[in-house]
Amino acid sequence: MSQASVPIDFRTNAQHVPPKMPGAVQKATARFLGGRAALVELLGEELWQQLRQAGHDLRLHAITHLDHYLVQAEQAVTKAGGQVHWARDAGEANRLVLEIARQHDVKKVVKSKSMATEEIGLNHALEAANIQVIETDLGEYIVQLVGVGPAHIVVPAFHLSKEEIADLFHKKLGVDAPSEAEGLTQIARTKLREEFLAAEMGISGGNFLVAETGTVVMVTNEGNGRMCTTVPPIHIAVVGIDKVVPDWESLTVLLKLLARSATGQKLSCYTSFISGPPRSQAETGPREFHLILVDNGRSRILQTPECRETLLCIRCGACLNICPVYNSVGGYAYGWPISGPTGAMLAPQILGTKVAGALPFASTLCGACNDICPVKIPITEILLHLRRRVVEGDAIEAAVAPSLLRAGAQAGSVVLQRPWLYQLGSKLLTWFQAPLKSDGWISKLPPPLNRWTMVRPLPAFAFDFRAWWRTHRRGGTR
Ligand code: SF4
């Protein structure tokens, strides 16, 4: 399986979230939001807003000139001795990685954290080809041992307690693990050193790709990214085509926005720049560098003006941290590795609304994500457009909402536009609900109206508001 093909049932997933998940998520997101707020305050609100606007403009410029910047990046990487490959979709990207692995008889791969490889389901493809793949970011390493994907795009295992991780290490690695962070990290570090040395190939993502020099930029807080991209003899960087930025000046703006928004840091602990393989015998590092540029639906996203700004995302995770829905259910309810508001925008456009049409509805549309997004993506507007795509269809996809639901919505629209019909409906409703009503509540409605009562009772329709209004206005109680 390269990427999700079974419809994502957000509603059911949300009902099966472990009870401790919301508390653990809220504790962690509050910490990140606090760190971010402190740094924004230090910088000053005015300067921060200027940076956000600059970040937005730079990213928008880059994605609307992708044809130019991607070719420039390709030429620069090739000139530096690297090899560039283009992948139309997830399957093609996985095939390219497997081909390179087979050419070199690779049996073991070490990977640094990369949402692009999560998106294309690279680990499944490698495992299906009998190639062992080891995640080396501490959080990714932990969730891989659990056998699940990341719960958050920046901090994959933040919902697990130290005690749970100690127990996991004991069961999976056969070690006596202390339930304190330093001891746990030391165990993972020792295990991973052996893997870095044994792996024949390292795979990374890339937070940005600087077009003018063809440089892949990796932003991490652990040294594993550098180990993956320098120790094994072959390095493959899998990068979405939307990650390209024109030059180093643009990069400085985006790095400032990313670290502050993601983890509340001025700059991440490691910012690595990879510009091809060694150029002389004296230099060390992988002898081969491959850059796989992945489209996987991005060109299609560019064709829809209402959704185009989805591609500005720098995967900082701030919209997840602030989102009341994400904070209530965590990442797994989204059924895709990229969760929260950014996943709700991206998944239906990459996987299609047949698979991920439920996700744009996993939002209260409160707008907190718009306000916090460092590159000013109008997230709720995009979600609204995607809701319309699901219900009515558009130039990209036909409607996927059940026809009964669509007919109901259309009937509702007709009624709401005609006051006399609305009044008649109000009267009829008070009669029709009588057999379903008990103590002022309706606990069960027949399909397809049962979507509400499946999860909570519905307050019974009490009276005709217009009649109530006439009585009270006459009585002078207005
Ligand atoms: S949509 Fe904005 S806030 Fe959310 S991850 Fe992307 S850049 Fe960050």
Image: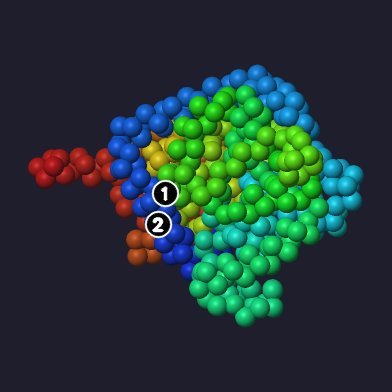
- The type of residue carrying mark 1 is Gly
Provide residue 262's location: percent of width, then percent of height. Answer: 47, 47
The numbered disc on residue 264 is 1
Farthest front residue?
282
Which residue is nearer to you in this view: 461 or 126? 126
Which residue is nearer to you in this view: 68 or 220? 220
77 to the left or right of 331: right
61 to the left or right of 424: right
- Whether disc 2's CB lies below 8 Å from ligand 1 is answered no
Provide residue 329's location: percent of width, then percent of height. Answer: 50, 58
Camera sees residue 440: yes
Farthest bottom residue?
176
Q: Secondary structure under badge 1?
A: loop
Q: Secondary structure under badge 2?
A: helix
Identify the residue at image location x=56%, y=64%.
Answer: 16
Residue 12 placement: quadrant = bottom right
- The type of residue carrying mark 2 is Arg
Identify the residue at image location x=69%, y=78%.
Answer: 174
Q: Which of marks 2 and 1 is in front?
A: 1
Q: Name the residue under label 2.
A: 31
Farthest left residue?
476
Q: How crowded is mark 2: few (under 14 residues within 10 Å), some or many (20 or more)?
A: some
Tell whether label 1 touches label 2 (CB within 8 Å). yes
Q: How far apart are marks 2 and 1 (CA)?
A: 9 Å
Which residue is nearer to you in this view: 397 or 472? 397
